């Protein structure tokens, strides 16, 4: 078995930032040239390139048309915005819009939040809703005595009188 996997040593991954490209980001030639340059720099290894949303859409089309061996990746910010928009879309009729309107009065703002267009307000609204739901569930999940014991243990941990491992063992 040792001989079978002897040559499977993994090479370390290189993550590198390239200089800013002085070109029109909407021009397909600029995107294509960027993709080809990334392929050249990766020396025939797997090439993963991260873009923001608008350029990513064009890059995916170019990669498909030219059949390039590149994995296009959507940047983290736009990925999260897209996810929040998707979440708002599937939860639209669940009363989420009404909850968001309690936090941010006004139909336009609430609709933008559900679409994922107001990132900071979107995150705040979802965190507030999550906290409210959590508190409601916790109120009914434990007795007052159990909640008191949990508070006491958490206070001991916060004051440094008890470590997290001791807390787990005491449960």
Image: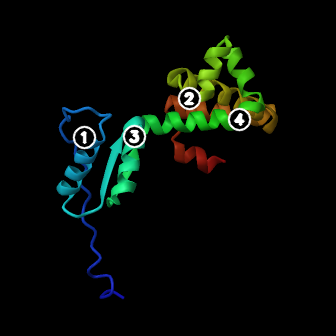
Residue at the spot of label 3: 75
Q: Earlier in the sequence, mark 2 or mark 3?
A: 3
Q: Which of marks 1 and 2 is nearer the N terminus?
A: 1
Q: Nearer the viewer, mark 4 or mark 1?
A: 1
Residues marked 2 and 4 touching at CB (< 8 Å): no
- Circle 3 — which element? loop
Residue 116 is labelled as 2
Q: Which of marks 2 and 4 is nearer the N terminus?
A: 4
Q: Where is residue 167 in the image (x, y as percent from the top left)?
A: 59, 44
Residue at horizontal 27 percent and vertical 73 percent from the top? 9
Q: Where is residue 46 in the image (x, y as percent from the top left)?
A: 29, 61
Q: How crowded is mark 1: few (under 14 residues within 10 Å), some or many (20 or more)?
A: some
Is residue 161 in sight in this rendering? no
The answer to whether the residues at label 3 and label 1 have Cβ atoms under 8 Å apart is no
Image side of residue 79 versus residue 99, left or right: left
Camera-side mark, 1 or 2: 1
Residue 111: which quarter of the image? top right
Residue identifier under label 4:
91
Up/down of 20 relative to 48, above or below? above
Is 157 situated above or below 99? below
Occupied quadrant, residue 56: top left
- For the N terminus, which image quadrant? bottom left
Secondary structure beneath disc 2?
loop
Per the model, the C-alpha gap separating discs 4 and 1 is 39 Å
Element under disc 4: loop
Q: How far apart are marks 2 and 3 (CA)?
A: 15 Å
């Amino acid at each position: 078995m040792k001989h079978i996997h002897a040559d499977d040593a993994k090479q370390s991954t290189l993550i590198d930032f390239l200089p800013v490209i002085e070109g029109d980001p909407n021009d397909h030639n600029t995107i294509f040239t960027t993709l080809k340059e990334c392929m050249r720099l990766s020396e025939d290894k797997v090439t993963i390139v991260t873009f923001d949303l608008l350029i990513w859409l064009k890059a995916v089309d170019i990669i498909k048309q030219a059949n390039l061996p590149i994995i296009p990746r959507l940047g983290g910010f736009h990925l999260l915005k897209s996810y929040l928009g998707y979440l708002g879309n599937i939860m639209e009729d669940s009363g989420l819009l009404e909850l968001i309107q309690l936090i941010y009065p006004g139909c336009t703002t609430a609709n933008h939040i559900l679409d994922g267009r107001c990132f900071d307000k979107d995150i705040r609204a979802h965190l507030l809703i999550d906290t409210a739901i959590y508190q409601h569930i916790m109120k009914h999940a434990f007795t007052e005595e159990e909640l008191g014991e949990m508070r006491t243990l958490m206070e001991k941990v916060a004051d440094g009188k008890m470590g997290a491992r001791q807390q787990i063992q005491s449960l």
